[in-house]
Image (spheres, rainbow, N blue to C red):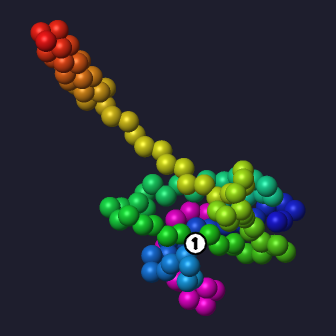
Amino acid sequence: MCNSYLSIKVHIVSNEWSEKNITWNNAPSYGTEITSEDITDGMEFNIDITDHISNSSELSICILEKSPYCTYGLQSNSKEGGGYNSPKLMIQYQGISIELGLFIFSLILMVLGTIGIIHQKR
């Protein structure tokens, strides 16, 4: 990495590739830039792709180094590398509303109450 910082940018790329067959020569070209960030050696960083997720089941991104380029560039473990430094996909989702939660809880209580009444009659 660099002694100070490394600037990266993240682009959306075509989903027309496969992990087993991709090479430097057949890699998809990159499209729209999603975000950019300055990172330092050993720094963990997150890429928020929320605004770019659609109804599609796939999203491909490319992480590029912006100039000025550093001697060793951006280095990362692969998923096969395992351990703490492996890339991770973190998913955050919004919970259900309080009203819906109370409705579901009420239904569960009604069902459990009905089961209890039926069980007592036997």
Is 61 inside the magenta-drawn segment?
Answer: no
Residue sitting at 48 percent across and 44 percent down?
92
Residue 30 placed where, x, y %? 53, 79
Q: Is residue 73 left or right of residue 58?
A: right
Look at mark 1 in the image and give the residue it sits on.
62
Which quadrant is the N terminus positioned in? bottom right
Q: Residue at x 55, y 83 (%)?
A: 21
Q: Nearer the viewer, residue 47 or 104?
A: 104
Residue at figure coordinates x 56%, y 89% from the top left? 26
Residue 33 visible somewhere in the drawing: no
Position of 91 compared to 81: left or right? left
Residue appearing at x 61%, y 85% in the figure:
23
The residue carrying pointer 1 sits among few (fewer than 14), some (14 to 19) or many (20 or more) residues within 10 Å by Cα, namely: some
Q: Nearer the viewer, residue 52 or 84?
A: 84
Q: Secondary structure at mark 1?
A: strand
Q: Position of residue 122 (x, y in %)?
A: 13, 12
Hey, which quadrant is residue 47 in on the image?
bottom right
Tell me if I can see residue 39 in this picture: yes
Up the image or down, 78 lies above or below 85; here it is below
Say what amino acid the circle numbered 1 marks: Cys
Q: Is residue 101 above or below residue 77?
A: above
- Looking at the rendering, the stretch of residues picked out in magenta corresponds to 23-36
Q: Magenta includes 32? A: yes
User: In the rendered view, would you say 64 is above or below 114?
Assistant: below
Q: Point out residue 75 in the picture as x, y percentages from the top left corner.
A: 75, 67
